[in-house]
Image (tube, helix red, strand yellow):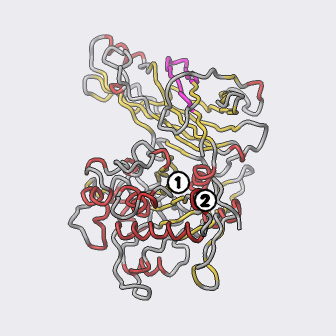
Amino acid sequence: MPRIERPFFPIIYVRGYAMTRDEILQTTSTPYMGFEAGSTKIRQAQDGRVLKFVFESPLVRLMKDYDYRDTYASGAENAGKLPPRSIVIHRYYDSADPAFGDGKAPSIPDAARALGQRIAELRDRVCGNVEADRKAFRVYLVAHSMGGLICRCLLQNPEVASAEVRAMVDKVFTYATPHNGIEMGGINVPSILSLNDMNNFNRGVMAKYLKVQKDKVNTLGDSGFPPSRLFSLVGTNSRDYAVAHGLSSLAVGQMSDGLVRIENAYVEGGPRAFVNRSHSGFFGIVNSEEGYQNLVRFLFGDICATGRLDIGALPFPPEIERARAQGKKIASSYYIETTVAPRGAYTYDLTSRTKAQESAVRREYSELFDAGGALARNARSPVLFSVFLDSAKILAGSEVAFSIEIAVSNAGYEIDGALFLKQHIPGEYLFRDTLVLFAKRDDAGGWKLRYVWADEHWATGPKNAAELARLGGKAIVGTEQEPSVFAVPLASSKGFQAELKIALAPWA
C-alpha cells in the first residue's frame, strides 16, 4: 500500500446547497454529487473551424492526470483500506433523503461535524495503525458554494470538531462560495427566511456558526488556519446562470456568478482567482477547465506568484489637465484589467479580470493621488493576481513561464461635478501590453526572473528577455515562506507610470 506523501493527500469533495426537496433527491441519487459533472463547450480553432472542447470533470481529470481513485466498490462505499490518493464525497445530504435518513436537511454545524468524523475515519482507513503515516496524514477539502461554508465551520467552530481533526486539514479550495453571504436586490438574505434553510447565507446566522463578528464573516477569525491555504475561485459570469429561469441572476445582478456577488465570494487575506464562469450549470465554475487548472496548481504546485500594481503617475488628457490647473475640481476613476495564463494554455486562463466580464479592478483617482497630483501616502495599490504554478508542468526549457495581460483605462472624467464627454474616445487606454515572465530557482534558494513585453517582441526568444534585480521588502500578500520580490517598470508615451511588483514564493 502506498505511503502518505505530500502533495498527494486524500481529497474530500463537499457539494453546495440544494434548495428544494426535488434538488435534494437528485443530489442523493448521484454518487459524486456534481464533482463528476463535465462540460462540452464550443470554441473557434486557429483555422476558423468550430470545434467541441470536452472537459471531462474534475473527478475524471484527477483520476487520469494524478492517479486518484474513488472510494466505491461492489455497489457501496469501500469500508476497507484506502490509498492516499482517494477522492471521498461528503454525502451530508443523505439524511435529508427519506430513503436514507429522516428526511431532514442537516444544519451547517451538523454537516461540519459529520465532515470532521469523516476526516478522522479516513485517517484510520488510509493509515491504519502505522504511527508515522498517521502523523503525516493530511487531507484536502474541495468545496462548491455552501460546501465551502461547511468547511469553514469545521475549521472555525471549535464546537463541531477537535483541534486534532482541524489540524489534519492541509488546504481548502472553494468554488463560488458565498464567504460574505448572499444578496438579492442588494439586500443580504434575511435571517427570518428559514424556508429551505436559505438563512444559512444571512451574515448574522453565518457569524454564529463561523464564530466571528457579523461584519467579519469573510474572515477566518481566530481559527488559526492560515488564509494563504484557503483558495477562493470567483465566478464572473452572471448571464449563463439559469436557475429559477434566470430570476436568481436577475435578482443578484451583474458583477456576480448569477448567485454570489464577486465582492462576497472570497476570504479576506486569502488567494483568489476570477474566471468567467457561472455559479453552476452548463457554463458552471466546477465543471470548467479554468477551475480544474487552478485546483491542481493550488493543491500540487510548488510556486506562488502574486502581483501588485503601484501606480506612480496617472496623466490627464490636455483639456482635463488645463481645467485642473485652473483650480476646477476633477474626479475620475480607472479600470485595471489583468489576465494571467501559464505557458502552454490555449483553452483557459488562471485568472481574468476585465471590463467585458464586469470584474476589472476599479480605482478612484482620489484613492491614489491628492488634489495636487501627488501620490497619496495611503494609496490603494491593487493586488492584481495571486496564482499558483507547477514547475513539473514546464513544457520547454528550464523556466516556468506565464503571461500577464495588463490594461489601464479611464472610466470617465468629471469637471466640477459635470461629466466630461465631448473629448471622450471609447477604447482609449493609458497603458496596454502583455508581459511574459520566466522564473527559475537560483543557487541561493531564491528566484531569478526575466521578462519581455510580448506586444513588441517574440516571447519565445530568450535573447529578448531582460533579467530583473531582486528587491528587499515584504511579500505582496501573505505567504508562508520568504518571497523573492521584483519590480517591472510600466510606462506609456501618454505619461502613465507604474511598477508591477511580482512576488515569487515556494509553495507546498
Rendered image quadrant of residue 74: bottom right
Taking the spot 38% from the left edge, 18% from the top edge, the residue there is 375
Q: Which residue is mark 1?
A: 170
Q: Which residues are magenta?
A: 487-503
User: Farthest residue toward the top?
Assistant: 326
Q: Quadrant of the N terminus?
A: bottom right
The reply to whether dot 2 and dot 1 touch (C-beta < 8 Å) is yes
Taking the spot 50% from the left edge, 58% from the top edge, the residue there is 168
User: Farthest residue toward the left?
Assistant: 192
Residue 493 shown in magenta:
yes
Residue 428 appearing in the image: no
Residue 376 lies, in percent from the top left, at: 35, 20
Residue type at numbered disc 1: Asp
Q: Is residue 260 left or right of residue 70?
A: left
User: Farthest residue toward the bottom?
Assistant: 99
Say whether disc 2 or disc 1 marks the residue closer to the N-terminus: 2
Taking the spot 64% from the left edge, 59% from the top edge, the residue there is 4
Residue 412 shown in magenta:
no
Residues 124 and 86: in front is: 124
Residues 485 and 135: in front is: 135
- The vertical placement of 239 against 124, above or below, is above
Q: Which mark is residue 9?
A: 2
Disc 2 on helix, strand or loop?
A: loop
Dominant SS of magenta comes to strand
